[in-house]
Amino acid sequence: MRRYRWLAAIPTLGMLGGVPFANRVRPYVLGLPFLLAWIVVWVVITSLVMALIFVLDSRRDAEIADVAATSSDRSSAS
Amino acid sequence: MTPALVVIVGVFVIAIALGLMARRGHVMNLEQWSVGGRGFGSIFVFLLMAGEIYTTFTFLGGSGWAYGKGAPAFYILCYGAIAYSVSYFLLPIVWRYAQTRKLVSQADFFVAKYESKALGVIVALVSVAALVPYLVLQLKGLGLIVSEASGGVITQAVAVWTSSVALVGYVVVSGVRGSAWTSALKDVMILAVAVGIGVYLPLHYFGGYRAMFEAVELAKPGALTLPSSGMSPAWFISTVLLTATGFYMWPQFFAGVYTARSESVFRKNAVILPLYQLVVLFVFFTGFAAILVVPGLKGAAADLSLLRIVERSFGSWTVGVIGAAGLLTALVPGSMILITAGTIISQNIYRVMAPDASDRTVSLVARSLVPVLTLAAVILTLRGGETLVVLLLMGYNFVTQLFPALILSLGERRRVSAASAIAGIVAGELTVVVLTVTSASVATLLPGAPQIVKDLNVGFVALAVNAVVLTVVALATRVPRPVVTELVRNP
């Protein structure tokens, strides 16, 4: 199971779910009005979360490849 | 010849030369022409995928929306990020299936999954109906950019005709390889231009970003937030979701997926592309700066805000570079649209009517269609009136109707019949036409509903009709069991 893949839903829920509450000008964040800053931060989080899933997936794929390699070694040995 | 003109013509010539050279070393059969022989590495696939974001719409429309509407423009930033996170899971599945079956078009995917050529014809018709207006939009933007940047020396008609002839040339010769090569040039230029002017203008005119936004808020109170009715948060959220749904349903985007050599590139892209599309932010800055620097552009003229502020602020050379970048934002998507439309008509309509046609003939038909489609688009661009605007509005909703049938087909075993997919798509498309022609909104359909419901994007109505019809027909029709399983079960 790759349950961590559900993490990908977080940025969408955070970005859009927060829009009604983040719909304001102040406080300014890095010179941006609050609503725009809110969206930009979530776009950056989207990339970070996808990077995390990418790393976890790569690790998982490598493990599976390892297991497959060992089992095929065994079967060829016997 | 002004310096601006020299730059525009120079970049144009380089782009066409790159497009023509892209063919070298490849025999152009249909698979090579439409999907680059499925041999594109990470960089080309990235450029094709990213290239689709920076169309003339983003360049002129993104700044135009910030200028004319303010905060509602931010939706452009959101739907891309969401679509990319979905792409991580969706595109590898699509790619794997297309790879083993040697598919060349999006309609092919439906034909193979649902084992129905009729569905392929329907999807092909929907695609062409959405693609031609989209091409017209690119050409209109191109004409506008070149004529403005050349200070009116080149008329819109001359710009549109010249670039269309060149476009046909390199599309026919190089196919999607031409798009990939020109998009490399385009992305470098657009990055430099968008970031350059987006950073420079607020600092130059206002001394900083916060100062600019405070001045905007003073001049146009409420421009930096969503209004409480109309383009409200409910409108915003529903529009982002709907647009993200339709994102990968665009046939040229879908076929772009087939060009990849391996599936790992989609996962990497899903990490990088959300950040990469933040470039749109700088396009917004330019639109906001223009509110105060070049005020008074009303309605559709708001799309000129970027060009006007650029003319006001820079010398002729810089205007030329920006005009050239704008030209490329029309050429690259334009070429992808032509290749996709040509492929779909020849592969999914012509081949069905002429089942004995050889691969060579189908490939020839695909390429022969390019000048025909371009001519139609040029005429619509220069002569088209009200009808065109309506068609454009419908385009995105047209392709979005393919979403339910596509998602239901992704599993190993198909769960719904081809008849139900056809019924759903046809019902959805008809609803789109009716809603657009009557300019209906949820507010006009349900006058008694609470404001939050009234503001929802009306596109969801068509998608809902589609889903309901699909479900009803799916329950009434049986999915034929795959022949192989039958044999195994009853030996």
Image (cartoon, coloured by chain):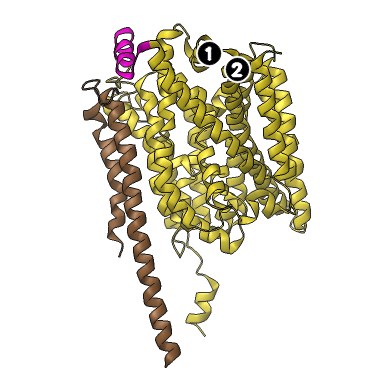
Chain colours: A brown, B yellow
Q: Amino acid at mark 1?
A: Phe
The answer to whether one can see residue B387 in this image is no
Mark linked to residue B317: 2
Q: How many marks?
A: 2
Q: Taking B339 as reference, is B53 left or right? A: left
Are tags 2 and 1 found on a single chain? Answer: yes
Q: Position of residue A37 (x, y in %)?
A: 29, 29
**Which residue appears at 33% of the width and 12% of the height?**
B216
Residue contact at pointers 2 and 1, CB within 8 angstroms: yes
Amino acid marked by disc 2: Trp
Was residue B221 drawn as part of the magenta stretch in this picture?
Answer: yes
Asked whether B219 or A13 is in front, the reply is B219
Is residue B122 in the magenta section?
no
Q: Residues within 10 Å of mark 1 (few under 14, many from 20)?
A: few
Question: Residue B248 in the image: x percent, y percent?
Answer: 48, 44
Mark 2: secondary structure: helix
Residues in magenta, as a range: B206-222
Residue at 58% from the left image edge and 41% from the top image edge: B126
- Describe residue A42's horizontal placement relative to residue B301 as left or right: left
Q: Quadrant of residue B15?
A: top right
Q: Position of residue A33 (x, y in %)?
A: 28, 22
Chain under numbered label 1: B
Label 1 element class: loop
* Residue of label 1: B314
Disc 2 crowd rating (10 Å Cα; few below 14, some 14-19, many 20+) is some
Check the picture and name the quadrant holding the N terminus of chain B: top right
Q: Is residue B87 left or right of residue B234?
A: right
- Name the residue nearer the viewer: B39 or B8: B8
Magenta highlight: main SS = helix
Residue B198 location (% of width, % of height): 43, 22
